[in-house]
Image (cartoon, grey):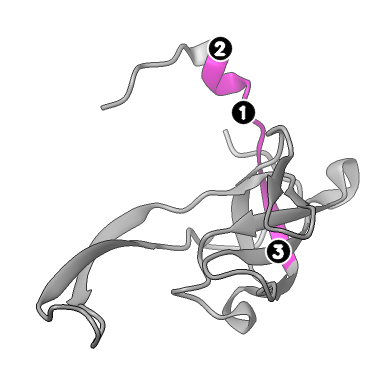
């Protein structure tokens, strides 16, 4: 377990529900997907990069709602000066798969993100508490 944080530190996170209105894989990317997320009237639309492209296709993401941390300092992503303005929340699970053909054979472990889904749609921008 990582270091504990205080309740006040947890409350500093602004976690909101947003709808992915557009998802695409940038030409330069080998692991991230660029998401345009509608986070409601108060926040508006943000660009968020998520490391999910090896496991999901853009059409599987578009039009769906997910939780996002929206008050992270923007971070430069990729070679074209794009910035990620938040973070998609996903648990990761360990999976085992065969090594690529050019490898030594056998199995290798990696992590796979699992998308968090809602049991019903809520307004974009709804706070997660």
> Depth check: 18 or 104 in front?
104
- Judging by the rendered image, the residue that carries numbered circle 2 is 8
Distance (Cα) linking label 1 and label 3 = 20 Å
Residue found 52% across the figure and 66% down from its top: 31
How many residues crowd mark 2 within 10 Å: few (<14), some (14–19), many (20+)? few
- Judging by the rendered image, the residue that carries numbered circle 1 is 13
Figure quadrant of residue 98: bottom left
Distance (Cα) linking label 1 and label 2 = 9 Å
**Disc assigned to residue 35:** 3
Q: Earlier in the sequence, mark 1 or mark 2?
A: 2
Residue found 53% across the figure and 72% down from its top: 53
Q: Position of residue 9 (x, y in %)?
A: 55, 16
- For mark 2, give the secondary structure: helix
Could you tell me how many numbered marks the image carries? 3
Q: Position of residue 82 (x, y in %)?
A: 78, 54
Q: Position of residue 113 (x, y in %)?
A: 41, 61
Residue found 83% across the figure and 51% down from its top: 40
Q: Is residue 110 magenta?
A: no
Determine whether, in the image, residue 105 is placed left or right of residue 59.
Answer: left
- What span is colored magenta in the figure? 9-20
Residue found 69% across the figure and 65% down from its top: 34
Asked whether residue 96 appears in the rendered view, the answer is yes
How many residues crowd mark 1 within 10 Å: few (<14), some (14–19), many (20+)? some
- For mark 1, give the secondary structure: loop
How many residues crowd mark 3 within 10 Å: few (<14), some (14–19), many (20+)? many
Asked whether residue 123 appears in the rendered view, the answer is no
């Amino acid at each position: 377990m990582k270091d504990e944080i205080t309740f006040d530190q947890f409350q500093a996170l602004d976690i909101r529900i947003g709808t992915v209105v557009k998802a695409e894989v940038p030409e330069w990317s080998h692991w991230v997907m660029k998401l345009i997320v509608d986070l409601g009237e108060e926040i508006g639309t943000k660009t968020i990069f998520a490391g999910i492209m090896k496991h999901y296709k853009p059409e599987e993401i578009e039009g769906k709602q997910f939780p996002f941390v929206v008050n992270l300092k923007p971070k430069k992503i990729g070679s074209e000066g794009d910035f990620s303005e938040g973070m998609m929340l996903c648990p990761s699970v360990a999976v085992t798969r065969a090594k690529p053909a050019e490898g030594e054979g056998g199995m290798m472990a990696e992590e796979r993100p699992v998308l968090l889904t809602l049991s019903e749609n809520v307004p974009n921008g709804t706070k997660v508490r």
